[in-house]
Image (cartoon, rainbow, N blue to C red):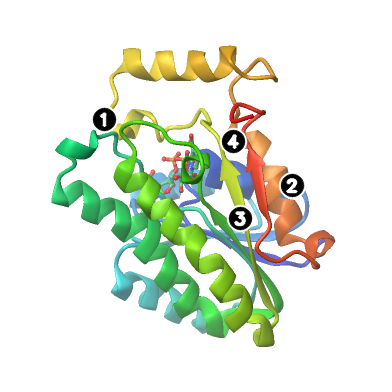
Amino acid sequence: MNQKTILITGGTSGIGFSCAAYLLKNGYRVIITGRNETNLARALQKLGAGVNGYLCDTSLLPDIDRLVENLKLVDTKIDGLFINAGIFKAANFAETSEAVFDETMGINFKGAFFTIQKLLPLLQNPASVVLNTSVVVFKAFAQTSAYTASKAALEGIAKVLNIELAPKGIRVNIVSPGVTKSPIQKKSGMSEEAIEQLLAHFSDHSPIGRIVLPEDIAPMVEFLLSDKSLILRNEKIIIDGGTTL
Ligand SMILES: NC(=O)c1ccc[n+]([C@@H]2O[C@H](COP(=O)([O-])OP(=O)(O)OC[C@H]3O[C@@H](n4cnc5c(N)ncnc54)[C@H](OP(=O)(O)O)[C@@H]3O)[C@@H](O)[C@H]2O)c1
């Protein structure tokens, strides 16, 4: 039985949910966060035993503080942290509003930054932090300027954290998924037709002959959270089925 406790931000759907299910199957204790009560309750019910859930909008610092206080109340110690909560809103650069910019940076970067910072007192020595970024950081995709900036910013702090947090036994690594079929596309503002075209393109032009699925990401995240990767610092696993080759 694996006794590690892993906290996943945004564990109510897609990649976060799939990772929670995979980790539970492999004997981890799992904590998920979500910003929507109904989605959180549904995810917890589907995941079953061994998981706890907390409401926390990762872009709101008071919510993160409340999460930390609630975890302290039940004496939680965290061995691994999967910084996964994120949004994508499709928008041309010229038309990207301040609201979309702020929401994207607020969740994907600021939220990630302060979630790690505020959870530091609960992290074990050793502990593993895994950041979910994206291939957009190194391969340009139209309509992703704010999203790309948020993910590049997140990758940008990984090296610094690996230096500053090393004395606490905390290491930071990255998963960089390619286009992965998940509810994120429907939430992006893209039309059904545009989503179908996107998924078909990345299925047809992939060396693996299909689209990447959340279930493909989960074992890579588990590897980076586990002691199998204790030696790794700032490593980035690109999980795209070879579409950016
Ligand atoms: N799918 C892809 O193609 C792809 C590719 C590369 C990287 N990624 C990254 O993978 C991560 C997960 O995305 P996904 O594809 O699994 O999408 P998803 O199914 O939409 O999952 C996103 C999760 O984050 C949660 N979330 C969003 N904003 C939040 C907030 N402010 N506070 C707390 N939780 C919040 C969502 O909750 P709600 O359901 O309540 O909104 C959901 O649980 C994101 O960081 C995304 O950028 C995805």
Q: Earlier in the sequence, mark 2 or mark 1?
A: 2
Q: Nearer the viewer, mark 3 or mark 1?
A: 3
Q: Answer whether labels 3 and 1 touch (C-beta < 8 Å).
A: no
Label 1: how many residues lie within 10 Å, few (<14), some (14-19) or many (20+)? some
Q: Are marks 3 and 4 in contact (CB under 8 Å)?
A: no
Disc 1 is placed on an element classified as loop
Ligand 1 sits in quadrant: top left
Q: Residue beneath label 3, please?
A: 174
Placement of the C terminus among the 4 image quadrants? top right
Q: Is mark 4 within 8 Å of ligand 1?
A: yes
Mark 4 and mark 1 in contact? Answer it, CB < 8 Å: no
Mark sitting on residue 214: 4
Q: Residue at x 81, y 67 (%)?
A: 231
Question: Distance between the Cα atoms at labels 2 and 1?
Answer: 34 Å
Residue labelled with disc 1: 189
Which x, y percent locates residue 108? 38, 55
Quarter of image, res 27? bottom right
Question: Mark 2 = which residue?
Answer: 25
Mark 3 crowdedness (10 Å alpha carbons): few <14, some 14-19, many ≥20:
many
Q: Secondary structure at mark 4?
A: helix
On-image quarter of the N terminus: bottom right
Give the alpha-carbon distance from disc 3 to disc 4, as whole Å: 16 Å
Of circles 3 and 4, the one toward us is 3
Give above or below for 84 relative to 157: above
If you read the primary sequence from the N terminus, does the residue marked by circle 3 or circle 1 appear first?
Answer: 3
As measured in the structure, the alpha-carbon distance from the residue carrying label 3 to the one carrying label 2 is 22 Å
